[in-house]
Amino acid sequence: MTDEARPSRLREAFYGRVKGKRLRPRQEELMSVLLPKLALDLSRPPPEDLHSLFAADVTAVRLEIGFGGGEHLLSMADRFPEIGFIGVEPFVNGMAKLLMVLDEAPRPNIRIYNDDATRLLDWLPEASIAGVDLLYPDPWPKFKHWKRRFVSAVNLDRLARVLDDDAPFRFASDIDTYVNWTLLHIRAHPAFDWAARGPSDWRAPYEGWPGTRYEAKAFREGRTAAYLTFRRAGR
């Protein structure tokens, strides 16, 4: 295993490969030139007002953890130009794909972070985020690997700290064991409420949902998805 493919011991919540197939020359160029312009620099203290991180005039900031190919992140940024979106993706190929799109059609309301999301969560100010999306995260299906799942007591503490009161935490997955795992962890955490009243509240995709390539593959293989929405309880 190369150093590039080996998970860093400093990463707390990202265990997979950081790079897949070789990037095309243009992608390599954008990783060197465009990524530094859009990536957040966590070596500096966060600004008192996160709105200042964006070139656009935004009124709130949302976070997407693990944006994959960027389909949902781009859709949200286009639908809500008044909101700033921070997209997190440690996987190099996913980041390169997003950069190709942003190079052709820049979104001034998008900033990105290409490392472990827990570092970003620890950097963000308290109650500074208007919503968090965790969509189709790595399910780590083997029992011995469940401890690697992003949803955990410690990470829910992190999310609770940065989310504003009543802000949504949205979780989608096609893996039943991960859905149940998440519901159990949410139930045990005092900072989150699940207000679902019936199956339609978790079977129907989110409003404006664009779908993703991973989701389409899951459907072809006969799996169904759950779209959960939790709320940050008032402090």
Image (cartoon, rainbow, N blue to C red):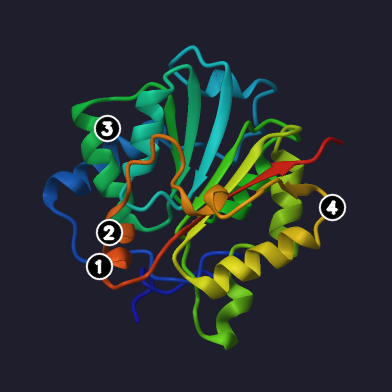
Which of pointers 3 and 4 lies earlier in the amino acid sequence?
3
Label at residue 216? 2
Residue placed most toward the observer, 172 or 200: 200
Q: Are marks 3 and 1 in contact (CB under 8 Å)?
A: no
Location of the C terminus (image quadrant): top right
Residue placed most toward the observer, 151 or 57: 151
Which of pointers 2 and 3 lies earlier in the amino acid sequence?
3
- Of marks 1 and 4, the one in the foreground: 1
Of the residues shown, which amino acid type is indicated by label 1?
Arg
Q: Disc 1 to disc 2, how far (Cα)?
A: 6 Å
Q: Disc 3 to disc 1, how far (Cα)?
A: 29 Å
Of the residues shown, which amino acid type is indicated by label 2?
Ala
Q: Disc 4 to disc 2, how far (Cα)?
A: 34 Å
Q: Disc 3 to disc 4, how far (Cα)?
A: 39 Å
Of the residues shown, which amino acid type is indicated by label 3?
Leu
- Residue hosting label 1: 220
- Residue hosting label 3: 102
